[in-house]
Image (cartoon, rainbow, N blue to C red):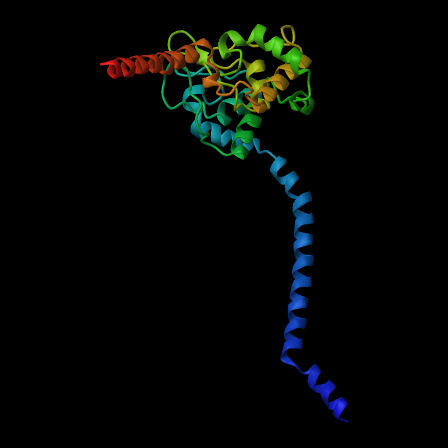
Amino acid sequence: MAREKKRRSGRRSPLAAAALIGAGLMITGGVYAGASAAFAATEPASVTAAVSTEDGQKLFQANCATCHGMNLQGTATGPSLYGVGELAVEFQMSTGRMPLQMQGPQAPQKHPQFSEEQIKNVAAWVQSVAPGPTYPEEKILDGKGDVAHGAELFRINCAMCHNVAGAGGALTEGKYAPGLMKTSALHMYAAMVTGPQNMPVFGNMNLSAEDKRDIISALLFQQNATQVGGMDLGSLGPVSEGLFIWIFGIGALVAITVWITAKSN
């Protein structure tokens, strides 16, 4: 009788009830979290991939038509966009070069004004009205091309402006070739295909798709490479190296000479 009474009192313990409620909540929460993760892994991809040419047209007319015209025909202050394609639009807007803040020797790169979705919408509308170069196959951007061959092609075709290390360089009349150490693979390809600013267009007659893949692979390799020589000094070659030696090397010699003279006196 005492044993039965003890068993009954154990079942009515508030700690046991709290433990059961806690376990139930943990199991329910785990199941819900797992289901939510599975749903998020499958559904949003199709939502984010969708573009709206209608929204893109509205954004273009509100922000770009002043310079490029309501129908992409161009104006006195902006070129026509016939044939530039969605690749050029994505490049110019994603790098913040467009919309242009002010007239100058060239459009500087800055933080983009629009979201990725808005940029895709504008690019899709331009492509639907006046088709041009479009996005490449994923293979072109995978960074698995021939790095040695790509580095050779880069030295022959690009290094005279962008520097052999991709650090960028000055051009004439206040223009410049930007550094490539933070440029994405897509924007490397877009620059070669669309020829923004002062850059020439490299068509398949100049550089094949595989050549472009090799150049992109070489630049991606350079971005992740370790500087085995120590400080790269901006990768500007003899300019920065000579300045470093002049300031610190000759400065040290002058300081030592002054110290020796003062000590002898």
* Residue 104: quarter of image: top left
Q: Residue at the location (52% across, 21% down)?
A: 181
Along the line of sight, which residue is nearer the eye, 72 or 195? 195
Q: Residue furthest front?
A: 264
Task: Give the side of residue 38 with respect to residue 259, left or right.
Answer: right
Q: Quadrant of the N terminus?
A: bottom right
Q: Quadrant of the C terminus?
A: top left
Along the line of sight, which residue is nearer the eye, 225 or 137? 225
Residue 58: x, y in percent?
49, 32
* Residue 257: quarter of image: top left
Along the line of sight, which residue is nearer the eye, 241 or 235? 241
Task: Give the side of residue 14 with respect to residue 63, left or right.
Answer: right
Q: Residue furthest bottom?
A: 1
* Residue 11: quarter of image: bottom right
Q: Residue at the location (65% across, 65% down)?
A: 25
Q: Is residue 38 above or below residue 161?
A: below
Q: Residue at the location (45% across, 9% down)?
A: 238
Residue 125: x, y in percent?
56, 27
Residue 201: x, y in percent?
56, 10
